[in-house]
Amino acid sequence: MRVDYRGGGRYAPSPSGDLHVGNLRTALLAWMFARSTGRTFRMRIEDLDRVAAGSAQRQLADLAELGLEWDPPIMWQTQRLTNYDHAISELQDRGLTYNCYCTRREILDAPSAPHGPAGAYPGTCRNLTTVAERAHIDAGRRPAIRLRSDVTEFTVSDALAGRYTGTVDDFVLRRGDGIPAYNLAVVIDDNAQAVDQVVRGDDLLSSAPRQSYLATMLGLAPPTYAHVPMVLNTEHKRLAKRDGAVTLSDLNAAGVDTPHVLSSIATSLNLADPDEMVTAELMLARFVPATLPSEPWILDPADLLRH
Ligand code: GLU
């Protein structure tokens, strides 16, 4: 029997609140990138941290209302703890991890490693003596687990940024509070969902080299990436709830119906003329990655209300 393997794309929101127009726009892009290339499209709820009650369900409902559809099942990270444990154990068994007792403050205050880039973990706990480790344990510190990286940078391929080289340090695999780190969970889950195309906001471009490197350490093929420009407010800061009516329910309550929200997003992506009503399907039919704007969408939320 022929196994019909198809790679996939995905959208992986953190259920920490309602999605705003920037998130909705990124989700639409991820869906269009995937479907326009014949890929599956998966949903993953990144609920290891910062969960607001009911928010995952509202996020899914909002995406469905925009006309996005996805291939089941939806993956929930809190149901996958044993998968993360296995990956960490495997790396531990191969000597590719170490315990780190540093506090956030200590890392900020530490001089950076001689050849390390700014912001990279300086390696304080990389070669801790047993005595020093004992002292940390006796002081009641709970260690994070870090990857023992043997590179300082790694190159990924991005549909918008081209070949992008960024820092790889000894990043955290499991936090001191026991929660698997985002960078680990992403790699394990993208593989489990057969994701070979990662589309997300360009605030995560600098994380891609770490994730890609970790994939290769685990014998997994890194995905291709498309880090898409974000939506910024008029101060050119990342759009947030405090900027006004920016979620679908806020906008609906303020009299802007979902088709108008979709129209604004489509216009910002050069997939509709101003005020032209479009469906997600029509956007998909028109979608050509090369014509995407390469600059962020600077949005005054008040403009969305002027329909
Ligand atoms: N859960 C992350 C977020 O909402 C996205 C992770 C990813 O796309 O890799 O920012």
Image: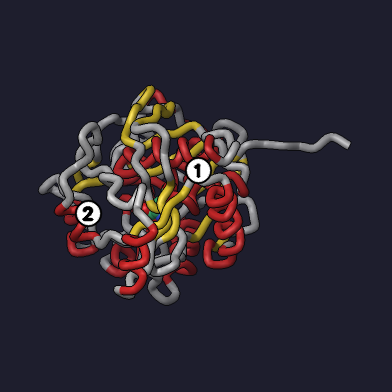
x, y (%) of residue 87? 57, 52
x, y (%) of residue 45? 49, 60
Q: Quadrant of residue 152?
A: top left
Which mark is first along the chain, 1 or 2? 1
Secondary structure of the residue carrying numbered label 2? helix
x, y (%) of residue 29? 43, 41
Instruction: Give the vertical position of 141 relative to 232 (above or below).
Output: below
Q: How far is mark 2 from mark 1, CA to CA?
A: 38 Å
- Seen at 37% across and 69% down, the residue is 142
Outermost right residue: 1
Density class for disc 2 (Cα within 10 Å; few <14, some 14-19, many ≥20) is some
Instruction: Return the residue nearer the eye: 178 or 166.
Output: 178
Q: Is residue 154 left or right of residue 110?
A: right
- Seen at 53% across and 62% down, the residue is 77
Q: Residue 31 shows which numbered tag?
A: 1
Q: Quadrant of the N terminus?
A: top right
Instruction: Return the residue nearer the eye: 305 or 233.
Output: 233
Q: Quadrant of residue 39?
A: top right
Residue 259 appearing in the image: no
Q: Is residue 145 left or right of residue 87?
A: left
Q: Residue 10 shows which numbered tag?
A: none
Q: Are marks 2 and 1 in contact (CB under 8 Å)?
A: no
Density class for disc 1 (Cα within 10 Å; few <14, some 14-19, many ≥20) is many
Instruction: Give the vertical position of 231 relative to 291 (above or below).
Output: below
Q: What type is the residue that disc 2 sits on?
A: Ile
x, y (%) of residue 259? 40, 53
Instruction: Return the residue nearer the eye: 12 or 169.
Output: 169
Q: Residue 107 shows which numbered tag?
A: 2
Q: What type is the residue that disc 1 sits on?
A: Trp
- Seen at 39% across and 23% down, the residue is 290
Secondary structure of the residue carrying numbered label 1? helix
- Seen at 44% across and 53% down, the residue is 173
